[in-house]
Image (cartoon, rainbow, N blue to C red):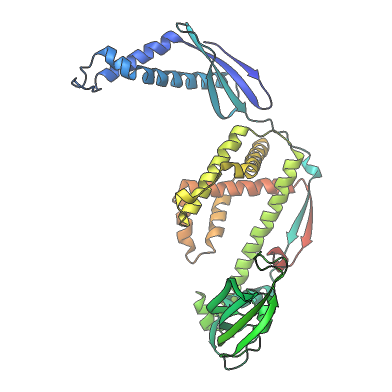
Amino acid sequence: MQSTVETLAGLERRLTLSLPTAEIETEAAKRLQRLSKSVKLDGFRPGKAPMNMISQRYGAEVRGDVLGEALQQRFYDSVREQDIKVAGYPNFESAGNEPGAVELTFKATFEVFPEVKLGDIGQIKITRPVAEVKDEDIDRTIEVLRKQRVQYRAADRAAQAGDRLHMDYVGRIGGEIFQGGEAKDFPVVLGEGRLLKDFEDALTGMKAGEHKTFDMTFPADYFGKDVAGKTATFEVTVKSVHEAQMPELDDAFAHSMGVDQGVAKLRQDIGDNLKREAKRRIQSRVKEQVVEALLKATPFDVPKGLIAMERQAMMERAVHDLQARGMKTEDIKLSDAVFETQAQRRVAVSLLLGELAKANGIVAREEQVKAMVEEFAQSYENPAEVVAWYYADRERLREVSSLVLEENIVEWVLGKAQVSDEAVTMETLMGKA
């Protein structure tokens, strides 16, 4: 048996494989013989059917299985002997075998992993955000938590910003009610921006039981194309006005947040959570810069087969997620083609980081994995249970190990790249400014 390999375009290779016909036929005959001892054909007891009938019924299938297994084995033996690193799966094609040929010849087309030569990391420039958690950041977070627990009580006065109103309204254009122009008991909090500003301005100052008629022109770029740029006449009746009552910042509020040691402990916990979130966001932004810079400094071909596999995996995850959200399978219209760009990048990043780690001996140490698991667990009420949950499943630990490895790679790059720190506020870091 001989095999020859030729280089095609890019990462594609073609391997010619030859298999002795006699070996295939001999193995197929052995399997059919074993099959004959248990197979049941109509009119015959198990194991008593004539061999020629068994061959006629199962011969092609058995021979196909034998040939497929032999091809796979021969292919992987050949690439191992020649130290060829195969990316993805090979595609086998017959090389025009004639009936009665002594050898069967096939061509296996496949891709190899690219040679990744790292660029000049010393020329990479990285800007690292630096943020300090201050008292005002904690205060701002507490205000958000208080607003999430706001309660409303009836207000015997004119409506103002922050009040919640319930109203009936009818809107007409040219004397006709337009689609979406009518509602009963519609709730709105003034100042939240759910309604157009002109509409909210008309509501401001109204009391419960009041009725008002006013004109309003929709913006030309309004999402409702049927009414965009048109003037509507609205009739509105305010049915109730409720003012917001924020909970007091006291021990009872801290208890409602799951903190029994009072406001001081609540502030400490919030500060710790903000620091963890800041660290995570800084690491994420730095990693994005590092990966992008590495890709630009290290161009290489990405195996199409690996991209296709990643596309398929991404589509399956997306379908599973949609199903978990209650969407019916028959209503999900997805093609893996929509994931092409993202899949290509994921595969490229995986190959690049893998080669960088291998070339420089970068690994995820056990104590680092443990530290990351414990850090994750600090965000939960019972950290010990979370740690146990991670260590109960090797796949979960493997995912954490991958994250640690990525962090180690980023730190290694930062040690060689040109890094400048940039002070930013927490609001900027969190994307709120």
Residue 14 image offset from top left, x and y in percent: 61, 20
Residue 41 image offset from top left, x and y in percent: 23, 22
Residue 65 image offset from top left, x and y in percent: 41, 21
Which residue, as the protein is rendered here, is positioned at the far front?
175
Residue 363 visible in this rendered orientation of the protein:
no
Query: Which residue is pictured at 67% across the width and 45% down the height?
Result: 409
> Does residue 371 appear left or right of residue 348 in this picture?
left
Q: Quadrant of the C terminus?
A: bottom right
Q: Look at the picture and state if 393 lies above or below 242.
A: above
Residue in the foreground of this view, choosing between 378 and 86: 86
Which residue, as the protein is rendered here, is positioned at the far bottom?
156
Residue 287 visible in this rendered orientation of the protein:
yes
> Does residue 250 appear left or right of residue 37 in this picture?
right
* Image quadrant in which you'd find residue 174: bottom right
* Image quadrant in which you'd find residue 219: bottom right
Query: Which residue is pictured at 61% across the width and 68% down the height?
Result: 272
Residue 274 image offset from top left, x and y in percent: 63, 67
* Image quadrant in which you'd find residue 143: bottom right
Residue in the foreground of this view, choosing between 409 and 157: 157
Q: Look at the picture and state if 74 lies above or below 426.
A: above
Query: Which residue is pictured at 54% across the width and 46% down the height?
Result: 334
Count of numbered tags:
0
